[in-house]
Amino acid sequence: MTAESREKSPAGRRDAREWISAQFTRVEDVVYIGLGLLLAASALVLLVLAAIKFGSSLLEGGFPVDAIDLLDRLLLILMIVELLYTVQVSFREHALVPEPFLIVGLIAATRRILVLTAEFVTLPGKGEGIFRNAMIELGLLTLLVVAMVLSLVLLRRRHPGAVADRA
């Protein structure tokens, strides 16, 4: 059998597809490694900056004022770590798992709720319309949190031995 007839045969096409698929998997692995390194470095840098901010806030006596900002930064770090976990699972299993994305969304919504409630102190002086919009946003964020928690509960009931539980 010649090389040309082998390429046209079903077995030759299967071999070519397997080779191409293997190359895509290698590229995917390299991308996941790069993403993981960048996410890990970002989380570490943000953690160090948050620790410095925490220390200076304690020394200067401004911690009560800076507490919300610090919590906001820590929740951002938690989101990045959860994304890093998602990259790790995707790299190891070569499959996307929905649970980490729901957790990141839950953290992001919680973050926004905390920032919004911290801003409530200044909202009454800005007008009734802005206050009403903030209340609507808070209500929608609350519904979003409830929906994501429900999704997580249903997901865990459906797949109790999911990848996220094994890691």
Image (cartoon, rainbow, N blue to C red):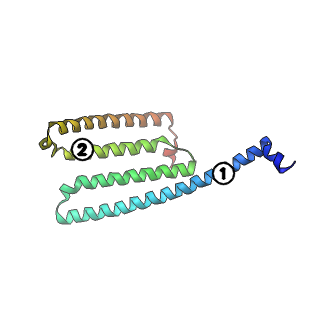
Placement of 35 over or under 157, stated as above or below: below
Where does the image place residue 47, in percent across and percent down from the top left?
35, 60
Q: How far apart are marks 1 and 2 (CA)?
A: 47 Å
Placement of 103 over or under 30, stated as above or below: above
Q: In which quarter of the image is residue 120?
A: top left
Q: Residue furthest front?
A: 4
10 Å crowding of disc 2: few (<14), some (14-19), many (20+) = some
Q: Which amino acid does label 1 sit on?
A: Ala
**Left or right of 145: which side holds 11?**
right
Q: What element carries label 2?
A: helix
Residue under label 2? 116
Q: What element carries label 1?
A: helix
**Left or right of 141: which side holds 16?**
right
Residue under label 1? 22
Q: Which amino acid does label 2 sit on?
A: Leu
**Left or right of 131: which side holds 104?**
right
